[in-house]
Image: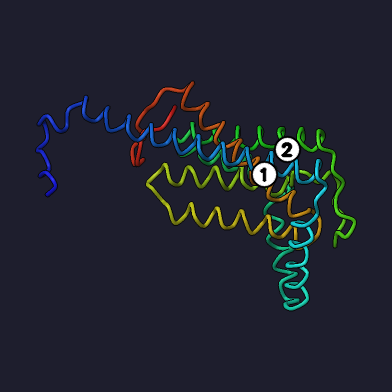
Amino acid sequence: MPAPLAPPGSSASTPTTRAAGFAGLLTAEVVFGAVLFIAAFSLFFYLTRVVFLYHSQVFDDWGFAQMDHLRAARPWTRPVVDFLTFFGSIWFFVPVSLLTPYLLHRRGFERYAIELLASMGGGFALNQLLKAVFHRPRPSTALLHQYGLSFPSGHAMMSMAFYGCLAWLAVQYGRRWGVAGALVVFCLLIGLTRVYLHVHYPTDVVAGFAAGTAWLVLLRTGIRVFWKEKKIPGEAASVSE
C-alpha cells in the first residue's frame, strides 16, 4: 500500500529529498542518452561498412522497390511527397532556424533558443563534413535534380536536428509526449520522401537519422555538463540556463 502524501514542511518534502529525486531523474536521462547514443552511433558505423566496405545494395534496392510500388499504385502520393519534402529543405530550415529561436527568446526561453540554434548549426556543419568524408554520389535514378553528395542525407539529419530538438523541448516543457511523437513521425516521413524521389539511397536516410540522433544526444550532454540547472516556471523538470 503506497505511503500517504506528507504535508508541506515534513521530512518527505525537504530539499534533500527533492535533490535525491532530481538525481534519480538525471541518472535515468543520462542512462537513456548513453544507450541512445551508442545505438545511433553503432547503426551509423554499421551502415558505413555495408555501403563502403561490403558495397551491399540489398537494403537500398528493397527500399527503392517499396517506394516505386507505392508511387505506381497511388500516383496521388507524388504531390503529397513534394509538399512534405520541402519541410526538410534548406529553403525551409534557414528561415525557420532563425525565426523559431527568436520567438523562443522573445517568450523568455533563451536557453531553448540557444539549444535549437546549436542543434541546427552544429548539425549542418557535421552533415557537410560527413558528406565530404564519404563522398557518395546521389542515385542516378533521381526523379528530380539535387545538388551535393548523398551520404548521409541532409534532409534526414537536419530534420532530426530540428524536429527532434523540438520534440525534446516539448517533453521537457510540460511533458507534451503527443506533440513530441507527432514531430518525430513528421521527421521520419520527410526521410521517406527522399527515398520516394530517389534523391537519396535508403541507407543515406537511415544514416542521416542516426547521425542526427547522435548529435542531439551529444548536444544535450554538453548542456547538462556545462550549464547550471535552473527551474523554469511551467516546466516539468529542471533545465539548464
Residue 81: x, y in percent?
Answer: 71, 65
Return the residue found at the far bottom.
Answer: 73
Q: Nearer the viewer, residue 207 or 84?
A: 207
Q: Residue at x 71, y 57 (%)?
A: 85
Indicate the colouring scheme.
rainbow
Q: Residue furthest right?
A: 140
Amino acid type of disc 1?
Answer: Met
Does label 2 or label 1 sit earlier along the sequence? Answer: 2
Query: Crowding at label 2, few (<14), some or many (≥20) Cα neighbours within 10 Å?
Result: many
Q: Is residue 57 above or below residue 126?
A: below
Residue 12, image x, y percentages: 14, 33
* Mark 2, residue position: 127
Can you give x and y, in whole percent of width and height, for residue 224 in the image? 46, 27
**Secondary structure of the residue carrying numbered label 2:** helix
SS at mark 1 in the image:
helix
Could you say which is closer to the camera, residue 210 or residue 86?
210
Distance (Cα) linking label 2 and label 1 = 8 Å
Q: Badge 1 is on which residue?
A: 158
* Residue in view at x 86 percent, y 59 percent: 142
Q: Amino acid at mark 2?
A: Asn
